[in-house]
Amino acid sequence: MTIVRTGARGTTGQRRFFEAPRAVGHSLGMRSLWLALALIGCNGTIGGDASLLCQACASDSDCNGNPCSKDRSGRLFCGAPCDSCPTGYSCQTVTSSSGTSVPSCYPDSTLCATAPPVGDMATKSGGKDGGSRGFDLANSSVDCSVPKGGTVSLAGGTVDRLFFGYTGDTRPSATSTSYPSQLQSVINNIYTQMGTRGVEFALDGGDHMEASTSTEASTQMGNYITAIGKLGKPVFMTMGNHECSKSFTTDCGGGEVNTDTKGAAFMSALKSTIGATEPYYRFDVNTNSGKAVFIVIADDAWDSTQSTWLDAQLTDADTNAKYTFVSKHHPDGNTDQAVFQTIYNTVTSHKYTLFMTGHSHEYKQQWTDSRAVVMGLGGAPFDNPKQMWWGYFTAMQCSDDNIYVTVYDESTGNIQDSWSVSPQ
Amino acid sequence: MLFFALLAALSEPDQALRTIEQQFAVRPRAESEAALVALAGRWPDAPAAGRALIWLGGLALGDGRLDAAADRFATTRQRFSGELRALAERGLGDVALHRGHFSKAAAFYGAGLSDAEAPSLRFELDEKLALAKRLHRRWLAELAAWLGLVLALAWLGRGLRRPLRLPAETLYVLPFTALMAALSWPRDHGVFVTLAWLGGGALVICTVAFAGSPAPGGRRRLALDLTAATVANLALGYIALRRGGIIDSLTQSL
């Protein structure tokens, strides 16, 4: 067995923390410790790992305790402990990605790419990626390229494959006459990025305002309409609890949404953008693989009429739709009003593809229901120190007919998470 | 060898980054991360490498791999300037916040603010800086609450005349508390943690107060007992809410 250095980085000949008992000591205690470590496999993973020599890296954490430094080509590669340099390598001082100078095995040719093979090294583990750090660029068997798309409106639409965006909770943190300019820039960015990615339309999860007067409510809805204009395609809004002036434990059902200070501003915006006259609505999109039904629920304007309507839509979709997407403000588990859970139970008693919500200022795929996703990071104040980013997700119907959900961080534009679900 | 074939195939880093992004959804996460590592190693000084590092850091942070996330962000911060450096500082602040190092988080967010240019990023860092400071204050308040709780328990338990055992009254409340916590478990982790702390803490307060309650005394002692019980319960309530992390969501809902 090749014993590799496993202590802290240092020059050859430095004392090592974990070495064979012959080199370190002869006490029974040390032998026992070494044996125990060997048995649990610690001997190859604590500190420097020679098996990654000249493997590509991005920073020190890829090199299992060794420095990640440039060779003469300017590319980054892992080093190895100086006491395990194979033929063609020697110990030299290199600058790690963290900026510190440390001794490491370095190819005599100064080029890792053309350095001699490291066949006499310890068995290659391949590191945490389990092998070559390559990336097969051959096309995946699943086509998830941006679809050609088509026109979608409240009256319906036709596309080749679905591709839509979703965000929620875009409200300011405090009552104000209008959106603060910086918040406006966040929401603008979200919809601009959705547009750049080529979505066909978008939905939101509600909570567009933090207002106390009708003027504030109208102005903030106007600000939101400006932001969704960046997408240049329809945005189907969901009513949130901030679109009703009542306490969060009561709602604006029975038509009160039309007379409520904030509800009226929301309804006016809904009508001017997509033409909806009720806070709950449905639209159908025909795809190459079948019909997709989108059902937008207003759980803060709940009444028996909407309840009957919802059941009828879901029942119809069970028979006629390949996909059923449901948007609602409050997520599964929210008990601000008892009816919220009843609505969720109604939806889950039917077929559904995704249950999309907001309200909680976080992103999560509910672990109690893998089709339920919360996206409440549209710009509203952070309330989860472990989820401090704003963003959105896109949902795409790929060539295998599954729906691929991709979650984006607005500040970086980077993907935060990705997963897929079958049609229903 | 596959890796080198890849590098030969890619002509420029931005194209490589786009390819990784386009295929992210249909590939195993490990493959995409390996490709990002390959990109950042192949063109270490290109802005795309900085974006790859930030991306790797974000993925590691999302998975709870805090050391790896910190390494990616620290490397970016050391190697790049401007917006990429600001994003790295944002990431380092997030890592510190995950670890409960609020002052350190605030320092990174503050540094990010001085490097950031985009209004949306500045807004985000502003919000995070305020949150880090708020969480630091709450941490200090929790320390004070613990002190109050310990002092109140010491007062209530003075003498310890009886053996430590649950008073009969709590046996009626215990199943209810346990049921509430159990119901919240699959729905809301924060509420579950809060209820668990409240339930467990209340048992301790009841047990100590019952075991240590002295013989009836005057009004002054009764007032002191009531004060101590109030302090203990208020302190416990604050600790439970902070531990559950639901203070902000609670105040926003209300």
Image (cartoon, coloured by chain):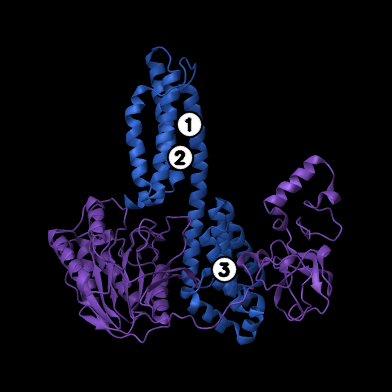
Chain colours: A purple, B blue
Same-chain status of marks 3 and 2: yes
Q: CA distance from mark 2 to mark 1?
A: 10 Å
Name the secondary structure under disc 1.
Answer: helix
Q: CA distance from mark 1 to mark 3?
A: 43 Å
Give the percent coordinates (x, y) of residue B85: 60, 69
Residue for badge 2: B239
Give the percent coordinates (x, y) of residue A387: 46, 59
Between label 1 and label 3, give the one nearer the viewer. Answer: 3
Residue B224 badge:
none
Does residue A174 sit above or below B42 in this rendering?
above
Does residue B254 sit above or below B155 in this rendering?
below
Same-chain status of marks 2 and 1: yes
Residue for badge 3: B56
For image coordinates 32% across by 72% down, the residue present is: A423
**Is residue A179 shown left or right of residue B132?**
left
Compare residues B170 and A88 and report the one nearer the observer: A88
Q: Check disc 3 and give the amino acid type.
A: Leu
**Dot 2: within a 10 Å radius of its alpha carbon, few (fewer than 14), some, or many (20 or more) residues?**
many
Question: Outermost residue toward the front?
Answer: A1
Residue B45 in view in this figure = no
Q: Do the numbered discs 1 and 3 sit on residues whose CB atoms are within 8 Å?
A: no
Comes first in the chain, label 1 or label 3: 3
Between label 3 and label 2, give the one nearer the viewer. Answer: 3
Q: Check disc 1 and give the amino acid type.
A: Leu
Comes first in the chain, label 2 or label 1: 1
Give the percent coordinates (x, y) of residue A109: 82, 80
Residue for badge 1: B149
Residue A241 in view in this figure = yes
Does residue A405 sit above or below A357 in this rendering?
below
Name the secondary structure under disc 2.
Answer: helix
Q: CA distance from mark 3 to mark 2?
A: 35 Å
Name the secondary structure under disc 3.
Answer: helix
